[in-house]
Amino acid sequence: MISEDLRERRHKIIEEHMDTEVAHEFDRTLGTFNGHPHYEIMATGQIFDGDEEVMAYYRMTRTAFPDQRHDNVRYHFADESVIVEFDLLGTNLGEFYGRPPTGKAFRVPIIAVFFFDEDRITNERIYFDAASLITQAGHAELLTLLASGEV
């Protein structure tokens, strides 16, 4: 069982991580990791490993959805991870997988599992319904690419 102090430090680092993503302060977001950022997007099978790939992920998602943000955040603490449930919101205002912006908004429930080494994140594993996000954002044609594993 983790100590209350470690639990609180993990809570604060996740808040910093999520807040700096929304503020597009990605150097600070990278600083919440243990020195090697790593994302696993379970809905698409994409993995972003290391500073360069993770920064490309941030640029891609924030170009498509510059107002991406979180709502209804809930935390669940375990010994080696923190599970965070939230609603992800955004508006497609930029290019998304080569498609022009639609101006349409989305709101999808997300579960993010943050894995830790002490109080630093080692991995963020994200679960969500990609079809809902893609459809709400006005890009239903991407569902075929998602199904084929090309996204």
Image (spheres, rainbow, N blue to C red):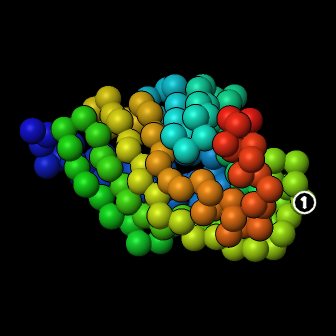
Quadrant location of the C terminus? top right
Q: Which residue is mark 1?
A: 100
Quadrant location of the N terminus? top left
Q: Amino acid at mark 1?
A: Pro
Q: Residue 6: horizontal and vertical position, in percent?
A: 21, 43
Q: Residue 146: horizontal and vertical position, in percent?
A: 69, 44
Give the residue at the far left of this rendering.
Answer: 1
Question: Where, by quadrant of the figure, is residue 133 drawn?
Answer: bottom right
Residue 6 horizontal side relative to residue 139, left or right: left
Q: Residue 116: horizontal and vertical position, in percent?
A: 33, 34
Residue at point 13%, 49% (across, down): 4
Q: Where 49 falls versus 96 (above or below)? A: above
- Which of the pair 117/102 is nearer the observer? 102
Q: Residues within 10 Å of mark 1 (few under 14, many from 20)?
A: few
Residue at point 20%, 44% (across, down): 78
Residue 49 horizontal side relative to residue 65, left or right: left
Q: Residue 24: horizontal and vertical position, in percent?
A: 66, 55
Q: Is residue 68 visible?
A: no
- Which of the pair 151/119 is nearer the observer? 151
Residue 131 horizontal side relative to residue 3, left or right: right
Q: Is residue 126 visible?
A: yes
Residue at point 42%, 49% (across, down): 112
- Which of the pair 95/24 is nearer the observer? 95
Residue at point 55%, 40% (across, down): 41
Query: Which secondary structure, mark 1?
Result: loop
